[in-house]
Image (cartoon, coloured by chain):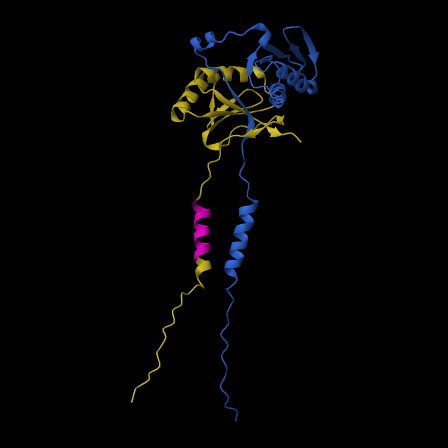
Chain colours: A yellow, B blue
Amino acid sequence: MVKIRKKTKAETLIPTASMSDIAFLLLLFFMVSTVFVRERGLKVNLPKAEKIEKIPRNHSATIYVSKSGMISIDDLEVEIPDVQWIMQKKYFDDFNVIACFRTDRDTNYGVMSDILNQLRYANTLRVSFEAKLKR
Amino acid sequence: MNLRRKRRWIGGIPTASMSDIAFLLLVFFLSTTRFDIKKGLGLVLPPASEEATQKVRLKEENITKILINKEGQILLRTFDGEEEIQMNQLEAKVRGIVRENPDMVISLKTDRKAKYQFMVMALDRLQAAGAEKISLSTN
C-alpha cells in the first residue's frame, strides 16, 4: 500500500510589524545628527529686482555688506583690503566661484565699488547681486 | 456552581497603520520644506590685469553711459547727447538702443554716495532690456 503522507508546507513570513519602528529610528537618528551649515552673516535688507536668476549654491561665496559698510565673509568681519586675499583663496579652491553680494539696499555704493575692484584683483570675476523678487 | 473559565483579554494597540502615518508625515515635510534659494542678478567683471584692459578700446559711439547721482536721478548719455530720465523709462530707452546697435556697451556709473538700491534697480532694468555688455564703474 502506498503511503500517502500529507506534505507539510513550510510557511515563510517576514515579520513587518517592527518595520515602522526601524523607519522612525532611522529618521530620528538622521534628524538629530544632521547639522546644517548656517551663516549668521549680517542683518541686511535686500534690494528688490525683477530679472533675478538662481545662483548655483555649490559655487557661491557670500559677502555680506551691512548698511554701515561692515563686510563679513564666512562669518568673519573683514576690511576692504582683506577681501582680495580671502577671495583669491576661494578662487584657488574653486575656479568657478561666484561672489554673491548680500548688501543692504541703503549701503553707499562706494563700498561696493571698492569691493568689486578687490574682486577684480582677486580674479573672481563672476559676481551676483542678491535681490528679492519684486512683486 | 459556575465553573466557567475566565477569558483573558490581551490588550493591544493596532500598529499596522503606523507606517502609513510615518510616510504621511514624511511626505508632508518633504513637500513643505523650502531651503532658502539664492537668487540675484549675475554679472561678469572685467579682469584687472593691464594687458587685458588695454586691448579693449571702444569707439565713442558704442558706449552709452548711465549716470546715477546720490539722489538717485538718472542721466542717459549717448554719443548724440544726454537727457535726464526716470527709472521706469530706463528699460524702454535701453531696449531701443540695444536693438539699434547690439554691440553697444552700457556703462553704469554710480555715485559713491548713492544708495546701492539705485544701482541694483538700474542693473535690473538693463538686464530686463536685454543689454548684454554692461560695465560698472564709480564716479
B75 left or right, relative to B9: right
Query: Magenta stretch containing residue A74, yes or no?
Result: no
Q: Is residue B115 above or below residue A4?
A: above
View extreme (left): residue: A1
Query: Magenta stretch containing residue A31, yes or no?
Result: yes
Comparing B139 with A125, the one in front is A125
* Tag count: 0
View extreme (front): residue: A1
Q: Is residue B86 above or below residue B16?
A: above
Identify the residue at horizontal 42%, vertical 22% (top origin): A86
Instruction: Answer with the quarter of the image where residue B138 lies.
Output: top right
Q: Quadrant of the C terminus of chain A?
A: top right
Can you give x and y, in whole percent of width and height, for residue A102 in the image? 54, 26
Q: Is residue A37 above or below residue B76?
A: below
B33 left or right, relative to A16: right
Instruction: Answer with the quarter of the image where residue A43 lies.
Output: top right
Comparing B25 with A106, the one in front is B25
Can you give x and y, in whole percent of width and height, for residue A1 in the image? 29, 89
For the stretch drawn in magenta, the main secondary structure is helix
Q: Is residue B25 above or below residue B67?
A: below
Identify the residue at horizontal 44%, vertical 43% (top origin): A34
Comparing B124 with B55, the one in front is B55
Instruction: Answer with the quarter of the image where residue A7 lies.
Output: bottom left
Which residue range is magenta in the image?
A22-33
